[in-house]
Image: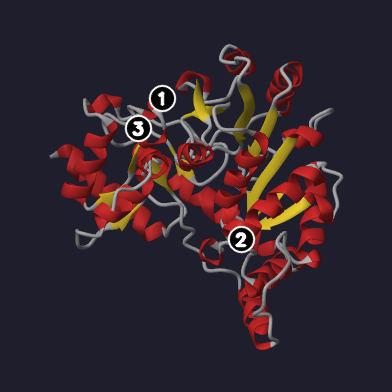
Amino acid sequence: MQTSRRAEASPRSGIREMFDLAASYEDVISLGIGEPGFQTPPHIVEAGVKALREGHTKYTPNAGIPSLREAIAHKMSDYGLNVNGENVMVTTGAGEAILLSLLVTTDPGDEVVIPDPCWPNYFGHAAIAGTNVKLVKTYEEDHFHLRAESIESLLTPRTKALIINTPSNPTGAVLSRQELEDISRVVLKHDLKVISDETYSEIIYDGRRHVSIASLPGMADRTIVVNSFSKTYAMTGWRVGFAVGDSNAITQMAKLQESVSSCVNASAQQACLAALRGPQDCVKEMVEGYRKRRDMLLSGLQEIPGISCLVPEGSFYVFPSIKGLGLSSREAAMKFLREARVVVVPGSAFGESGEGYIRISFCGSREDIKEGLNRLRQAIKN
């Protein structure tokens, strides 16, 4: 069948490409995909099972069950957002929330500014929405932090939206309040809408605190905050995310979801409600586990010639430079897969500025990280 130009134009994620390539090899250690090595906490699992037994197997409202929407709104107060359930929509993962956000903030032919490097799914979302991408470069010497002046230099009359991601996937950069205030001034000056991907908001290290741009003066009504239960609660397979924003934008997004997926799985929503209402010690324990894995990985990478790495401020990825190896990022990733049976993701998958880097995930087991480092070291030695 001849497929549409829209489908042909939608790029494949380089993360998933490496994931699929690895399936043809045996004895592979994956340090590529952002899949928490922890299991979903037991009290959340039990809530999901209980929901199924109690008959939560029917359709829910398009925007999600009211109790979960209210619980999410309450959680947002931790980040300085004063919202209620009408400002919240439950989605099938953060990815759907970002796509729907683009669909309600831009029209075909409009421009969206996206940081480079970035989560590659943004490119697919923009292609589906018919939105033209303008990449704002970030640099290692600036710790890959997004700068307001760089954003402003790209703007044209057709620029309608900006995507920001803090903490960042793939770089681990965490934007400070001052940096976000600088960005907000550009947004207000040029009447932009912001899609703020805050999926890793709880996974931050070394005493830093997450700041949501929506909490800054003048930004609440022009920002859609996107988040997810996947990373915070190790619930990737449950597929539940959410969007928080202006009630009119949320209403329009819910209307679109009616035609896309109708609603999110009912029992999964009940499990997420238990996640928010239950003890949060599990989150703190997982984040501390990630910090220890981060430090272990960084220590090991420092011993490998040709590789250098910044300390990630958040998320569970490192983004080391492999420029000293004399290989492109894809060549390096394929070398590590073929010769070491270790999966990493080429930096080029995350945008032009990702060339010369690879992304390594440290959310798996300590044993896999240790063995993966040994294999990488041997592959480079050979």
What numbered label is drawn on residue 240? 2
Q: Earlier in the sequence, mark 3 or mark 1?
A: 3
Q: Secondary structure at mark 3?
A: helix
Compared with 302, 274 (above or below) is below
Task: Check disc 1: other Cα within 10 Å, few if <14, some if 14-19, many if 20+.
Answer: many
Residue 206 seen in render: no
In this rendering, the label closer to the viewer, 1 or 2? 2
Q: Which residue is mark 3?
A: 348
Q: Secondary structure at mark 1?
A: helix
Compared with 156, 300 (above or below) is below
* Image position, residue 269 (x, y; %): 68, 68
* Image position, residue 68 (x, y; %): 76, 64
Q: CA distance from mark 2 to mark 3?
A: 28 Å
Q: Amino acid at mark 3?
A: Ser
Left or right: 339 with respect to 309? left
Q: Amino acid at mark 2?
A: Val
Residue 94 seen in render: yes
Q: CA distance from mark 1 to mark 2?
A: 30 Å
Q: Which residue is mark 1?
A: 353
Q: Earlier in the sequence, mark 1 or mark 2?
A: 2
Left or right: 5 with respect to 304? right
Q: Nearer the viewer, residue 92 or 148?
A: 92
Q: Amino acid at mark 1?
A: Ser
Given contact means CB atoms under 8 Å apart, are the residues at marks 2 and 3 in contact? no
